[in-house]
Amino acid sequence: GIECHPGAFRHGIRVRRSAQRAIGRDRELRLLAGQTELVRSGRGGIVLVGGGAGIGKTTLIDETAQHAEEHGFAVLEGHCFDLAETPAYGPWIDLFLHLPPIGRVPLPEAFALPGAVRRVPSQLALFAQVERFLVDVSSRQPIVAVLEDMHWSDPASLDLIRYLALSITSH
């Protein structure tokens, strides 16, 4: 079945609004709706949605993202892709490339121009840029970030998620 683990990871995708409904997933939908309400109240969080192929994870996330958008959340979405090797920060590059309009919040320098991620002086500087961006956006409106297919992710993207997971509770 599908497993939802609050506190494990945060998700991020270019959400394909599925015409399907998450049938038989009321418990999981309630859990995810509860997590979005915690975000609305000012408590950041990370959720990992995991399970076998074809059991409805994307449909569940699509429904949750749609619900969040309908309730005033900015939904930020990035994907990993089934390639021989996902490029460094691949899902984050995808997320910033497909960012919805979110006001006058400047993009992190590392993701503002193609190839800029390679010119950041250190990993910590890049992490701080992304953290600052997410804090700035979330001060204007609550956000849900969905990173899809993280099992294909590159190590640097996972490091960034770990960093954000530790910092998210302090904001």
Image: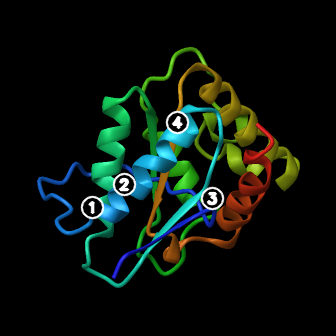
Q: Quadrant of the C terminus?
A: top right
Residue 15 visible within the image: no
SS at mark 2?
A: helix
Residue 125 visible within the image: yes
Q: Amino acid at mark 4?
A: Ile
Q: Amino acid at mark 3?
A: Tyr
| Residue at 56% in and 42% down | 38
The disc at residue 30 is 2
- Which residue occupies the foreground of this view, 116 or 6? 6
Q: Viewer-nearest of labels 1 and 4?
A: 1
Q: Are marks 2 and 4 in contact (CB under 8 Å)?
A: no
Which residue is label 3 attached to? 89
Give neighbour class at mark 4: few <14, some 14-19, many 20+ (Cα, 10 Å).
Answer: many
- Which residue occupies the foreground of this view, 145 or 49? 49
Please tell me whether residue 140 is drawn above or below residue 79 in the rendered image: above
First-in-chain label (1 vs 4): 1
Q: Position of residue 78 (x, y in %)?
A: 46, 52
Which residue is label 4 attached to? 143
Q: Amino acid at mark 2?
A: Arg
| Residue at 26% in and 71% down | 56
Which residue is label 1 attached to? 26
Q: Are marks 1 and 2 in contact (CB under 8 Å)?
A: yes
